[in-house]
Amino acid sequence: MNTFEMFVSYSLLVASTLSLFTYWITKKFILKKMNRTIMKAEHNYQQQIASMQQQLSGKVGILEGMVEKLRLSNQELSRLNEIRSKFMSIVAHDLRQPLSSIQGFTSVLMMDNPQGGGNNDQIALNNIIKATDNMNLLMADLMDISMIESGKFKMDFKNFIFNALIADVVALQTVNAQKKGIFLVTYDYPTDICVYADRFRISQAINNLLGNSIKFAPQGGRVEVRYFVLGDKLRFCVSDNGPGISHGEKSKIFQKFHQADNDRNVKKQGWGLGLSIAQEIINAHNGIIGVESAGLGQGAYFWFEVPLSPSGKVSGKTPCEEAQANA
């Protein structure tokens, strides 16, 4: 091996040694710096986690406190609601007897004195009778709401002819309509419609809807009643040309104790329970109820749907035949 080859070999050895030494130094210091950076980052991360856990623990404590307050508030609200329901039931029940006594004694006075002892006396006695009738209706509404809230609002389902029910209700409401000079028009369905429902409660719902339309229709106004078959449902509708209902009121119209302010010329009567009770009655029949109005001054259109009587025969009779036999 000549001198040049020895020099090249020695140079390569030195270069390799320097490279290894440089790699070792670089690795040692860089890795040490990286480890320090990683440890610092890990420390910061753990501090952040600890801080977040502490904040979360504080917020959990606040949330638990709020949940407890909400639970206590709901408990108190349930207690007050129960007291209110009992109060309404007691008031409605206890007031009925004195009202009946007042009404009875007034009727006796009217019979004993047909002339009423004078025109003014007769008017006064008639006003007492009207006032007690109105109070009895109010008490009945309170009793119904009390039963609804206590879960005692039961239905007595039977087959009956809906056309005959409408005739009865319209005959009763025609008197109220005539007093206001309102045209009450009924569009009868050409054939008998048989429904399986609680006749008294459906009659109550119709009276509430129809009475509401008559109350808000203007002097000389018009109220229309329609009913017809829609698929496997019966649809009842009542429309009027009264003050109408604003868009914001439509979502509240069936709420308990709600009374619309659409027409300030209409004197508020009752508790604002009639439409709410009607809704509960229709819901109990697996039906739906609603209201439509184009806006203030455009009148209102109330409607509900309930299922028709199921097809087929019971005890050898169709539902309509059974209803006619029970009528």
Image: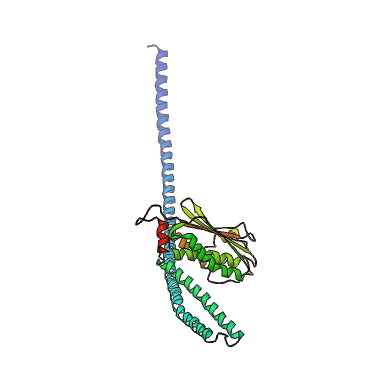
Percent of width and height locating residue 197: 43, 60
Which residue is at the front of the view, 100 or 44? 100
What colouring does the structure picture have? Answer: rainbow
Where is 271 relative to 250, above or below? below
**Residue drawn at x 52%, y 55% as measured from the top left:** 190
Q: Which residue, as the protein is rendered here, is positioned at the far bottom? A: 117
Q: Quadrant of residue 17?
A: top left
Give the total number of marks visible in the rendering: 0
State the quadrant of the N terminus.
Answer: top left
**Residue drawn at x 61%, y 84% as measured from the top left:** 119
Which residue is at the front of the view, 45 or 59? 59
Percent of width and height locating residue 63: 43, 60
Which residue is at the front of the view, 145 or 237? 237
Q: Which residue, as the protein is rendered here, is positioned at the far top? A: 2
Does residue 86 appear left or right of residue 294 in this picture? Answer: left
Which residue is at the front of the view, 319 or 79? 319
Where is 180 relative to 105, above or below? above
Percent of width and height locating residue 192: 48, 57
State the quadrant of the C terminus.
Answer: bottom left
Q: Which residue, as the protein is rendered here, is positioned at the far left? A: 315
Q: Quadrant of residue 183?
A: bottom right
Res. 255 in view: no
Percent of width and height locating residue 261: 60, 66
Where is 38 relative to 80, above or below? above
Res. 324 in view: yes
